[in-house]
């Protein structure tokens, strides 16, 4: 049965796409599993970094399983498949922990959009990127024309989405989309995560919020999160909470 598996060890969480018979193409069950894991990871203070990997050597993820959406009505396709997938991938992009995608093989369609939602990417030498949706009469639906166009050169996104061309690991690294190319992308991503686990988790979280705000990745929420973090550390906040609980008027000192 296809799934997304979660393991946590020494502060590093590993999310593994486990549908190798279908080149790790996403099913509804996999989307639901990913959503549940992301909620858990955001609340787990022991987790310092999240690595996204996939079973098998040929493909990281080739997008969405056509059997999962092929029979949906237009309304169901838009509402349950595209919007739900978009929401879950946004959740990954805004996760409070640093995230690394290990692209061991093809990252096509939804697989490329999933990788784009991570903070950095490591790619195997023989892997490739593509947006092949037009081959089956659809368009990218999980931010391939939005987030991807912000973090890759726009002509390269057009090359994939409009012309059906594939992008090699070397080209992906040259444009900055991929941080490193490695023989074993999973092993290299794990090595990077081990370094992240030694950093200040709060500093990493705040820095990620600041970068997300600058990159317009849910800027409103990121701005308010930063403001909330700052005000929560003040004596005025403590006084306000204490006064409410004691049913008295607060005496704010401006500290």
Image (tube, grey):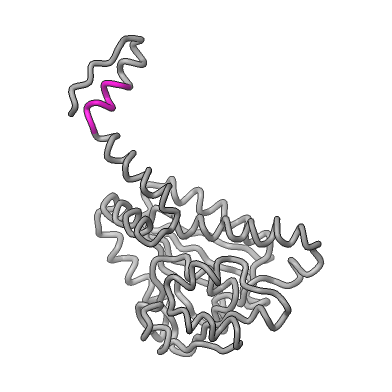
Query: Residue placed at 37% from the left, 60% from the top?
Result: 98
Q: Tell me if I can see residue 159 in this picture.
A: yes
User: Where is residue 92 shown, x and y percent of the image?
Assistant: 49, 58
| Residue 184 picture quarter | bottom left
Magenta residues, as a range? 234-240
User: Where is residue 128 shown, x and y percent of the image?
Assistant: 51, 86
Residue placed most toward the observer, 73 or 62: 73
* Residue 237, magenta (yes or no): yes
| Residue 249 picture quarter | top left
On screen, residue 96 versus residue 28, left or right, reads left
Residue placed most toward the observer, 243 or 36: 243
Q: Tell me if I can see residue 10 in this picture.
A: no
On screen, residue 91 versus residue 211, left or right, reads right
In this view, 22 is above or below 114: below
Query: Residue placed at 38% from the left, 62% from the top?
Result: 215
User: Where is residue 151 shown, x and y percent of the image?
Assistant: 42, 72
Query: Residue placed at 58% from the left, 62% from the top?
Result: 4
User: Where is residue 57 shown, x and y percent of the image?
Assistant: 54, 82
């Amino acid at each position: 049965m296809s799934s997304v598996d979660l393991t946590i060890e020494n502060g590093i969480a590993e999310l593994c796409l486990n549908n190798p018979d279908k080149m790790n193409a996403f099913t509804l069950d996999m989307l639901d599993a990913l959503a549940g894991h992301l909620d858990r990871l955001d609340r787990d203070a022991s987790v310092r970094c999240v690595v996204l990997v996939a079973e098998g050597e040929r493909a990281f993820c080739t997008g969405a399983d056509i059997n999962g959406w092929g029979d949906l009505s237009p309304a169901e396709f838009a509402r349950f498949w595209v919007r739900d997938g978009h929401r879950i991938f946004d959740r990954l992009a805004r996760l409070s922990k640093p995230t690394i995608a290990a692209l061991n093989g093809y990252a096509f369609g939804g697989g490329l959009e999933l990788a784009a939602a991570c903070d950095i990417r490591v790619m195997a030498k023989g892997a490739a990127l593509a947006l092949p949706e037009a081959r089956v009469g659809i368009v990218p639906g999980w931010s391939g024309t939005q987030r991807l166009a912000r973090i890759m050169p726009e002509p390269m996104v057009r090359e994939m989405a409009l012309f059906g061309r594939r992008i090699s690991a070397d080209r992906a690294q040259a444009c900055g989309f991929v941080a490193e190319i490695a023989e074993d992308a999973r092993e290299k991503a794990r090595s990077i995560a081990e370094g992240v686990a030694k950093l200040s988790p709060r500093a990493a979280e705040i820095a990620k919020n600041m970068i997300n705000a600058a990159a317009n990745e849910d800027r409103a929420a990121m701005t308010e999160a930063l403001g909330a973090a700052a005000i929560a550390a003040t004596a005025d906040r403590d006084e306000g909470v204490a006064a409410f609980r004691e049913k008295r008027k607060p005496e704010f000192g401006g500290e």
